[in-house]
Image: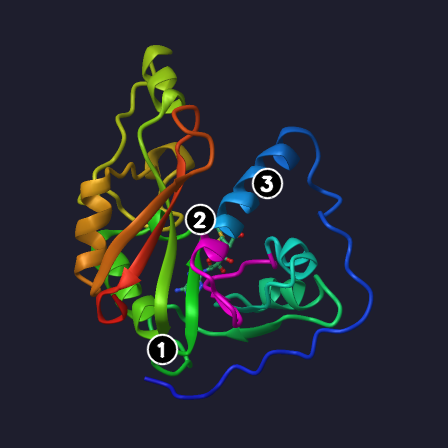
Amino acid sequence: MGTSSAEVPDVKGPPPSTVPPSEVGWRRVNSHFVYGTIRKAIRDGGVKGPILMAPCGYGWYFQRFRRDNIEVVGMDIAPSRIERARATVTPPMKVIEGNILQMEFADGQFELVLTNRFLMHFETDFRARAMKELARVSRKYLLVHYDVPSQHTFMRKLRGFKKKDFTPEELQGWRSNKRQKRRLIYTPELMAAEGATAGLVVKKIYHVFPVLASRVYCLYEKKSAT
Ligand SMILES: C[S@@+](CC[C@H](N)C(=O)[O-])C[C@H]1O[C@@H](n2cnc3c(N)ncnc32)[C@H](O)[C@@H]1O
């Protein structure tokens, strides 16, 4: 695995605007609470140094992270997304091109690694390999977005939504299904099992909107750090 270091830009200059102009209405409210949940987990962990966001897409929440003095190193496989992520704040966050299955970071380089809106789109083998690699570059914490049963999933069933939620074994992978077909719903037991294969234990599960919405963030801690 790689050993290159990720330097963090010297953060000076005026504070950036807080939210992208595209975030309006419900999206903005949702983003506010999602970001607040992530920030709480980061602060609860007492994380000081830069965090790694893998993948980072177009620089999701970079503006909010910068406003809160949380420095981020991003990585993504898509050059077009990297270009946008680098343009999101000034001075830019450091953004590296790479594959999450083999990242050019040293073992334990980041105190906390965040992965958002990503793993649940993949099949079991990919997720297991990605979890191991994310755990490798983390010194202490891995914060992972999962979906869990909620009123939202319950209402879908009540409305006669025909397709059942997929189990990990049934999920076929990134972009091969429409969104509702690649919805992977977790239980705390599944999260614990997924983490255990990568040497992680569940420290805390953070709900964005308890009961109402499916999104949670599972804060794993490395067994070696406990
Ligand atoms: C749904 S987006 C989520 C991006 C970001 N985490 C967010 O919340 O906005 C998924 C991202 O994963 C990236 N991606 C897909 N496969 C990848 C891989 N093997 N390694 C790194 N990034 C990957 C895509 O380029 C895309 O930007």
The crowding category of the residue bearing disc 2, from other C-alpha atoms within 10 Å (few below 14, some 14 to 19, many at least 20), is: some
User: How much space separates mark 3 and mark 1, taking CA atoms?
Assistant: 29 Å
Is there any visible trace of residue 170 in the rendered image?
A: no
**Amino acid under label 1?**
Gly
Q: For the magenta stretch, what is the residue range? A: 41-59
The crowding category of the residue bearing disc 1, from other C-alpha atoms within 10 Å (few below 14, some 14 to 19, many at least 20), is: some
Is there any visible trace of residue 174 in the rendered image?
A: yes
Between 89 and 175, the one nearer to me in the picture: 89
- Whether residue 69 sits left or right of residue 115 in the image: it is right
For image coordinates 46% across by 30% down, the residue present is 209
Image location of residue 217, percent across then percent down: 39, 46
Closer to the chain start, of discs 2 and 1, is 1
Question: Which SS class for mark 1?
Answer: loop
Q: Which mark is residue 117?
A: 2
CB under 8 Å between discs 2 and 1: no
Report which residue position mark 1 lands on.
108
For image coordinates 42% across by 65% down, the residue present is 112
Image location of residue 133, percent across then percent down: 31, 70
Image location of residue 109, percent across then percent down: 41, 78
Report which residue position mark 3 lands on.
31
The crowding category of the residue bearing disc 3, from other C-alpha atoms within 10 Å (few below 14, some 14 to 19, many at least 20), is: some
